[in-house]
Amino acid sequence: MILAKVVGTVVTTISHPDFKKRRLLVVQPLALPNDTPEGYFIALDSTHAGVGDTVLVNREGGGNRQVLENPDGCVNSVIVGIVDSLYLEE
């Protein structure tokens, strides 16, 4: 799992059946102050997150299938939580 910031949304006219009635959000992984962040990626939303929210993203297929209750789902990244606060100690 990783922490990320929601930076945008994806709008589709046709989508895979596993994505029906779920939002696709663009997320940017968070990095520590001296680290370079990874690139953006798309995650399926299961939490009603919005742009600007800090979220917890599961990037493991088996766990994602359990979250979505779809044993045959083809989902790579799922937002599984919205982070209320984050504290880093140096």
Image: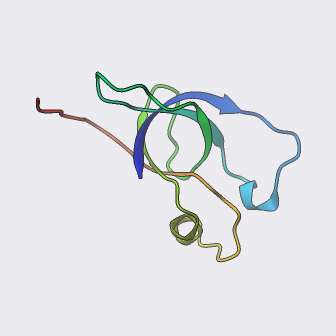
Q: Position of residue 52 (x, y in %)?
A: 46, 25
The residue that appears at 54% across and 72% down in the rendered structure is 66
Give whichever of 58, 38 is nearer the camera: 38
Q: Is residue 12 left or right of residue 87?
A: right
Q: Position of residue 57 (x, y in %)?
A: 47, 48
Image quadrant in which you'd find residue 40: top right
The residue that appears at 35% across and 26% down in the rendered structure is 35
For the view shown, which residue lies furthest in the front direction? Answer: 35
The residue that appears at 40% across and 32% down in the rendered structure is 30
Give whichever of 57, 35 is nearer the camera: 35
Q: Position of residue 59 (x, y in %)?
A: 52, 54
Q: Is residue 15 left or right of residue 90?
A: right
Q: Is residue 75 left or right of residue 11?
A: left
Instruction: Indicate whether 73 appears above or below 54.
Output: below
Q: Is residue 81 left or right of residue 78?
A: left
The residue that appears at 66% across and 59% down in the rendered structure is 75
Location of the C terminus (image quadrant): top left
Image quadrant in which you'd find residue 10: top right
Q: Position of residue 88 (x, y in %)?
A: 18, 33
For the view shown, which residue lies furthest in the left direction? Answer: 90
